[in-house]
Image (tube, rainbow, N blue to C red):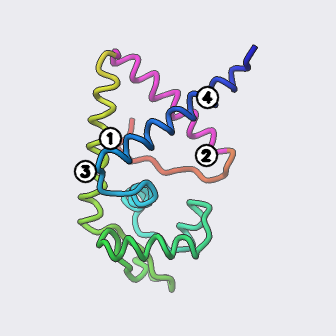
């Protein structure tokens, strides 16, 4: 008999596959890494390469390539540290916000279609379990992900 965690692994693998295929075939404006990075900057505000490296557990050279590409696309910009520090920080641009929000709206519309037959209580239960799952991963990893202040 399969363990419950075997079933969780299977379902999370399928979820990742569905999300990946949907983004690839959708014509969304951003690749996954840009979307995630923009989401973090939008919630947390300007961040340095060091802060991004810590948040994403990526080396600086990888982030330098990603941020350079995003700067060329006008999604982010470098600014002096608003807190007066030495390191320059990256901040999301209005174009970055626009594209991130467009991609998010596309994703929400897709979820609306998937969940259209679910009750409000079922959706709330799913959100609570998914959030618990994610925050437990973040706790074990030591890298909590900030949530929007307006989140319930």
Q: Which residues are magenta?
A: 118-139
Task: Decide if residue 123 is on the left or right side of residue 6.
Answer: left
Alpha-carbon distance for marks 4 and 3? 30 Å
Most extreme residue toward the front, as rendered?
Answer: 25
133 in magenta: yes
* Residue drawn at 34 percent across, 67 percent down: 92
25 in magenta: no
Q: Residue beneath label 2, please?
A: 138
What secondary structure do most residues of the magenta stretch adopt?
helix
- Image quadrant in which the C terminus is located: top left
34 over 106 or under it: above or below: below
Q: Residue beneath label 4, please?
A: 10
Alpha-carbon distance for marks 4 and 1? 22 Å
Q: Residue beneath label 3, please?
A: 102
Task: Decide if residue 118 is on the left or right side of residue 125.
Answer: left
Q: Earlier in the sequence, mark 2 or mark 4?
A: 4
* Residue drawn at 38 percent across, 70 percent down: 70
Q: Earlier in the sequence, mark 4 or mark 1?
A: 4
- Mark 4 is surrounded, within 10 Å at the Cα level, by few (under 14), some (14 to 19) or many (20 or more) other residues, namely few
Alpha-carbon distance for marks 1 and 3? 9 Å
In this rendering, the label closer to the viewer, 2 or 4: 4
Say what secondary structure mark 1 lies in. helix
Between residue 14 and residue 117, name the one nearer to us: 14
Measuring from the top left, give residue 137's x and y in whole percent: 63, 42
Q: Are marks 2 and 4 in contact (CB under 8 Å)?
A: no
* Residue drawn at 56 percent across, 60 percent down: 55
Q: Residue beneath label 1, please?
A: 107
Say what secondary structure mark 3 lies in. helix
């Amino acid at each position: 008999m399969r363990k419950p965690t075997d079933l969780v692994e299977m379902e999370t693998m399928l979820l990742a596959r569905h999300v990946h295929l949907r983004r690839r075939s959708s014509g969304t404006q951003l690749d996954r890494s840009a979307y995630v990075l923009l989401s973090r900057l939008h919630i947390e505000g300007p961040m340095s390469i060091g802060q991004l490296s810590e948040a994403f557990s990526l080396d600086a050279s990888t982030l330098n390539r990603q941020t350079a590409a995003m700067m060329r696309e006008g999604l982010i910009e470098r600014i002096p540290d608003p807190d007066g520090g030495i390191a320059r920080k990256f901040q999301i641009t209005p174009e970055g916000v626009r594209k991130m929000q467009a991609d998010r709206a596309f994703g929400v519309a897709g979820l609306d279609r998937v969940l259209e037959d679910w009750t409000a209580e079922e959706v709330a239960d799913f959100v609570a379990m998914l959030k618990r799952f994610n925050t437990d991963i973040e706790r074990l990893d030591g890298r909590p992900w900030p949530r929007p202040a307006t989140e319930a």
